[in-house]
């Protein structure tokens, strides 16, 4: 129920945001009137999406023959009512690269959301515990943003400059809407063709890849767009920053996906329980698709930062049409076929992104490959024990926990050693971080 309802909320959120944050980040002369106009547009669009979710919940519930889907959608509509009152403030913090308030808002929001979900689930509220946990998390984020709000950020909306916000938002909405449609297509198609239960197995398999999104991308994406935009405004070569970001993402993503693919059994067993072990072969395929996609995850961000919204739309269109076509044509072959369709679609998306980056910023495939080469070595070295054990060893109910812990520790050690030996740029960041921590401890 939650997985299907979340798809519609995610699609609505693409309209809700309407590119307001991106508008504020890239705007060179940000006045109070423009801030009020952005807030006004955000409220109008977000509340309209809340009304659509609430009023359309009954139709969606009847379409899937699941009343619970409608219940979840009505609760999720509350998120859309609350979000605008923190979105503009958080966007201003991103524009100024001022991260502490965003960090506290994110941490407190996640802690609140998890706490509410666990408590309500323990009390027997089932899938509705997830719905109410999302509302509580949003409410906490808005509260933190309101408390930390700078004096020059208005509380009330305005209409002067609204047209400029709408024009910009129209371009950005299409970019992110296409992305969300492609991301949501598997759940929608599988839910309709194969039923609601297979959606659960697919979601659990996809959840391993989502760990990377939550632990790494959730922190990287808010930083990259304002960073690329600042580089573009200052007339610098954005290729340098982009390739550095790709190197960082792949040296974390490729080893992680390879390790998770090999250790899919213990990972699924530990995270979700024995009833979801049918997701193991699906998770391995989806980890492969994620490894292909991670190279170009920031392509759209760098294009938007340069003002190439039309090209960003093209990249998203090709990528997401490939995803939708890949799953629609092979879903009749079952969940395995759907996952292989997404794996193939990842290569089409990578081709489109690389072509666009070559045309707009002169980034060749050779330069991209050179930036990723050290990451490939790190992935092969660090995940080798897990891959070999998965191929020649035995993982079952008797030893899955021991295997996960032992190979997990081995993976972490080999990852650090290989990052150091290949001279990966991330090693310098790790050393700088450790040095700063030592300095802070000495000063304390």
Image (cartoon, helix red, strand yellow):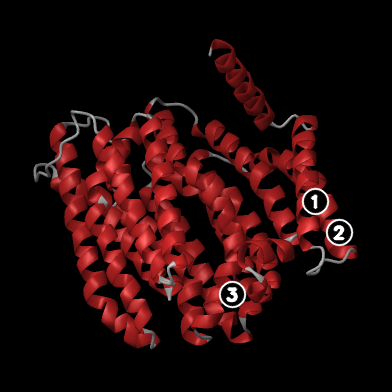
As measured in the structure, the alpha-carbon distance from the residue carrying label 1 to the one carrying label 2 is 9 Å
Secondary element type, mark 3:
helix
As measured in the structure, the alpha-carbon distance from the residue carrying label 3 to the one carrying label 1 is 25 Å
Residue that mark 3 sits on: 201
Seen at 22% across and 57% down, the residue is: 81
- The tag on residue 70 is none
Seen at 25% across and 35% down, the residue is: 147
Residue that mark 2 sits on: 389
Secondary element type, mark 2:
helix
Q: Is residue 368 left or right of residue 44?
A: right
Earlier in the chain: of badge 1 and badge 2, it is 2
- Position of residue 175 measured from the top left corner of the image (x, y, whole percent): 38, 56
Earlier in the chain: of badge 2 and badge 3, it is 3
- The tag on residue 407 is 1
Viewer-proximal residue, 189 or 73?
A: 73
Q: Is residue 414 left or right of residue 148?
A: right
Seen at 56% across and 57% down, the residue is: 210
């Amino acid at each position: 129920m939650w997985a299907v309802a979340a798809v519609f909320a995610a699609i609505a959120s693409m309209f809700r945001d309407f590119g307001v944050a991106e508008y504020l980040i890239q705007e060179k002369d940000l006045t109070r009137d423009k801030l009020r106009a952005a807030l006004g547009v955000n409220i109008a669009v977000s509340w309209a999406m809340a009304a659509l979710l609430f009023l359309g919940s009954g139709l969606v519930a009847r379409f899937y023959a699941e009343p619970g889907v409608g219940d979840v959608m009505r609760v999720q509509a509350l998120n859309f009512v609350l979000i605008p009152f923190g979105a503009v403030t958080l966007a201003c913090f991103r524009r100024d690269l001022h991260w502490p308030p965003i960090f506290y808002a994110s941490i407190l929001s996640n802690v609140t959301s998890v706490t509410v979900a666990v408590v309500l689930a323990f009390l027997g509220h089932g899938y509705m515990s997830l719905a109410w946990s999302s509302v509580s998390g949003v409410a906490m984020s808005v509260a933190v943003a309101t408390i930390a709000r700078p004096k020059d950020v208005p509380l009330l909306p305005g209409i002067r400059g609204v047209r400029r916000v709408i024009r910009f938002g129209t371009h950005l909405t299409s970019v992110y809407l296409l992305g969300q449609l492609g991301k949501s297509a598997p759940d929608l198609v599988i839910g309709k063709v194969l039923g609601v239960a297979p959606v659960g197995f697919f979601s659990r398999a996809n959840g391993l890849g989502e760990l990377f999104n939550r632990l790494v991308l959730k922190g990287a994406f808010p930083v990259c767009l304002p960073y690329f935009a600042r580089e573009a405004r200052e007339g610098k070569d954005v290729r340098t920053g982009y390739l550095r970001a790709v190197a960082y993402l792949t040296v974390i993503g490729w080893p992680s996906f390879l390790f998770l693919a090999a250790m899919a059994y213990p990972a699924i067993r530990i995270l979700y329980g024995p009833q979801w072990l049918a997701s193991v072969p699906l998770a391995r395929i989806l980890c492969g698709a994620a490894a292909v996609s991670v190279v170009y995850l920031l392509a759209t961000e760098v294009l938007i930062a340069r003002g190439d919204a039309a090209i960003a739309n093209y990249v998203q269109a090709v990528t997401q049409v490939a995803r939708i076509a890949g799953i629609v044509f092979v879903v009749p072959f079952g969940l395995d076929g759907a996952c292989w369709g997404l794996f193939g679609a990842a290569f089409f998306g990578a081709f489109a992104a690389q072509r666009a980056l070559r045309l707009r910023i002169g980034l060749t495939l050779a330069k991209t490959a050179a930036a990723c080469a050290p990451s490939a070595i790190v992935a092969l070295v660090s995940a080798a024990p897990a891959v070999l054990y998965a191929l020649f060893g035995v993982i079952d109910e008797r030893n899955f926990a021991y295997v996960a812990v032992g190979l997990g520790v081995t993976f972490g050690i080999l990852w650090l050693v290989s990052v150091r030996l290949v001279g990966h740029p991330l090693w310098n960041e790790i050393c700088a971080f450790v040095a700063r921590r030592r300095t802070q401890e000495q000063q304390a």
